[in-house]
Structure formats: structure tokens, C-alpha cells
Image (cartoon, helix red, strand yellow):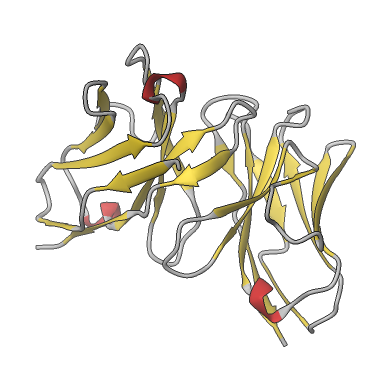
């Protein structure tokens, strides 16, 4: 099974800050890595698909990138409404696997 | 528009079985796989399994192999997940999600809360 290690598990940042979250899969997965935002009691929503493609309707402050074996979600200027938990997920192989999640809090 | 509507919350006793439904609309049902994801209280997302809506073929995560059964009814565009021998560790929100061709989950059900308690 492909393991996906996500870091950090939580972070606290101020409005306007640049925030980065990383995921490292245990093996090569090409660009088959997606990012989700989840707010309490709600289903996750898709932010970025295929490593770097912005889902329609998602604010442009969200971006995804890949470098070597590491994938990164960046929020360029954190907003109060971005307080949530973020997950990465690999779709290269089954079983599909999620990262452990990153809880983003606003200072 | 694409919609996945899940059945309502369930309260079960340990040892019981559970069947959750996920009714799809707004697209050609057999063209997309449906995956299931579980989230225990205060925990992350855990992938459970998938069903090929066209053929009925399934694949289960090791943690659920032998205890979870996925089926579908193409006449009603509905996928079913049955879980047997429930324990308190099965208390969770369960989601169905449609898999896009790139492997991502754009459309999710609203979630079904399952509580297992004696």
C-alpha cells in the first residue's frame, strides 16, 4: 500500500500569512495527488486535483505543486475562512490513501 | 447537477449489521466508480473501498475486507454498503464519493453518521 505522510499536523497563522502543507508518498505516484479542505461536520471539498490543477470555483490563493517526491499545498494569503483541516489523497493505486490531515487555525 | 444522497443516521448495537445507501443523480450512473470513506470522531479520512458501478466489481481496504460488502442497483442508481459485526470502533461518519477520471473526489454524499453503542 502507498503511505502518504502529511506535515505539519497542525499550524497556527495570521490572516495574510503564506501557509504551506506538504505530502510525501512512500513511492512514486506521478501527479495522482489531490488536496481537500474539510470544515467540521461537512464533507471534504476538492481544492486541487492532479497535483497542481485548481478546481473551478476555488480561490486563486490556493495552489498546488510537486517537486521530486514531495507535493505542496500553498495558501498565498491566509483568510479567516480558510480555518479548516486539509488532506492530501493519492489516486495512483488502490487502496487509495489520505494524508493524516493538517489543522489550520487562525491566530 | 450531480448529487449523491445518503441514507440517514443509524444507531446500532455491537454485533449488529448496517446497510447504508448512496443514491446518485444528475449523471450517467454506470460511467463512474463510487468510493466510500470513513471518518471516526476527531480522526482523519480513511478509505474503505470502491465499486465499479457498471460491472459491480469491488475492491476493499485490508481493514474492511470480509466485513464490508458493496453492491449497486443500476435501476435506481444506488450503491449500498453493508458492514457486519459492528463494534464501537465503527462509530463514524461514512461518506460516499464519485471518482472523477483523474482519481479525485469532486462530488461527495452528505455523510451518514453511524453510532455503535450498547
Q: Residue at x 78, y 27 (%)?
A: A30
Q: Quadrant of the C terminus of chain A?
A: bottom right
- The residue lying toward the viewer, choosing from B109 and A95, is B109
Residue A26 falls in image quadrant: top right
Residue B117 falls in image quadrant: bottom left
Is B30 placed above or below B89 here?
above
- The residue lying toward the viewer, choosing from B47 and B97, is B97
Is B40 placed above or below B24 here?
below
Residue A17 falls in image quadrant: bottom right
Percent across and percent down for residue A89 are: 62, 42
Q: Is residue B33 visible?
A: yes
- The residue lying toward the viewer, choosing from A41 and B2, is B2
Q: Residue furthest top?
A: B55
Percent across and percent down for residue A65 are: 85, 45
Q: Residue at x 44, y 67 (%)?
A: B42
Q: Residue at x 66, y 64 (%)?
A: A9
Q: Is residue B61 visible?
A: no
Is A29 placed above or below A76 here?
above
Amino acid at each position: 500500500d502507498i503511505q502518504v505522510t502529511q506535515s505539519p499536523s497542525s499550524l497556527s497563522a495570521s490572516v495574510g500569512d503564506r501557509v504551506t502543507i506538504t505530502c510525501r508518498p512512500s513511492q512514486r505516484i506521478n501527479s495522482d495527488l489531490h488536496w481537500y479542505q474539510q470544515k467540521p461536520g461537512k464533507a471534504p471539498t476538492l481544492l486541487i486535483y492532479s497535483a497542481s490543477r485548481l478546481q473551478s470555483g476555488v480561490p486563486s490563493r490556493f495552489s498546488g505543486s510537486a517537486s521530486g517526491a514531495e507535493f505542496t499545498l500553498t495558501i498565498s494569503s491566509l483568510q479567516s475562512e480558510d480555518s479548516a483541516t486539509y488532506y492530501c489523497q493519492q489516486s495512483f493505486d488502490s487502496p487509495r490513501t489520505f494524508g493524516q490531515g493538517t489543522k489550520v487555525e487562525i491566530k | 447537477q450531480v448529487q449523491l444522497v445518503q441514507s440517514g443516521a443509524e444507531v446500532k448495537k455491537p454485533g449488529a449489521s448496517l446497510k447504508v445507501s448512496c443514491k446518485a443523480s444528475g449523471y450517467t450512473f454506470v460511467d463512474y466508480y463510487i468510493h466510500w470513506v470513513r471518518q471516526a470522531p476527531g480522526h482523519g479520512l480513511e478509505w474503505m473501498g470502491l465499486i465499479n458501478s457498471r460491472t459491480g466489481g469491488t475492491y476493499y481496504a485490508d481493514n474492511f475486507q470480509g466485513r464490508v460488502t458493496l453492491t449497486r442497483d443500476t435501476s435506481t442508481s444506488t450503491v449500498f454498503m453493508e458492514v457486519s459485526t459492528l463494534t464501537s470502533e465503527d462509530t463514524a461518519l461514512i461518506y460516499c464519493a464519485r471518482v472523477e477520471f483523474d482519481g479525485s473526489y469532486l462530488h461527495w454524499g452528505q455523510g451518514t453518521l453511524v453510532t455503535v453503542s450498547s
